[in-house]
Image (cartoon, helix red, strand yellow):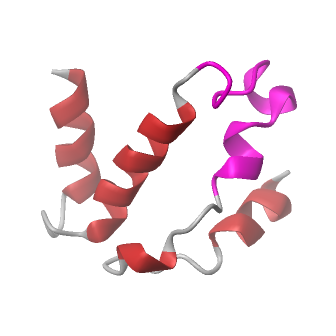
Amino acid sequence: MNEEIGEQFSDIVVGKPETFKDQLKPILSNERLFFTDLYKDGIGEKIEEMFREMIAGIAGPGAVKATIHKYVH
């Protein structure tokens, strides 16, 4: 699945959140990966929102860590 997932992310550019459209949908709805469709469970959209924050790069280096910290703490 590495190649398949890599293809989903190939058009996404860090620092340009507008390049992120619906590339995560096939991944987050894949019941083989998560044993459930995360959109049906109401969490898919939230994960997309977090991902968008991470790639926006607003926080610069450390954007991923800052985003995770924001939602976990």
State whether residue 6 is above or below residue 69.
below
| Residue in view at x 68 percent, y 24 percent | 40
- Which span is picked out in magenta? 24-41
**From what the image shows, is residue 58 above or below residue 43?**
below
Position in image of residue 34 (x %, y %):
73, 25
Of the pair 57 and 29, the residue shown nearer to us: 29
Residue drawn at point x = 72 percent, y = 46 percent: 27
Taking the image as shown, residue 2 lies to the left or right of residue 18, namely: right
- Residue depicted at 63% across the width and 53% down the height: 24
Closest to the observer, 71 or 6: 71
- Please identify the quadrant where the C terminus is shown: top left
Choose top left, top right, bottom left or bottom right for residue 37. top right
In the rendering, at what x and y percent does residue 11 appear? 61, 81
Above or below, 61 against 10 in this view is above
Identify the image quadrant of residue 32. top right
State the residue at coordinates (55%, 23%): 42
Q: Is residue 32 magenta?
A: yes
* Image quarter of residue 4: bottom right
The x and y percentages for residue 8 are 71, 66
Compared to 28, does 42 lie above or below?
Answer: above
Q: Tell whether position 37 is magenta.
A: yes
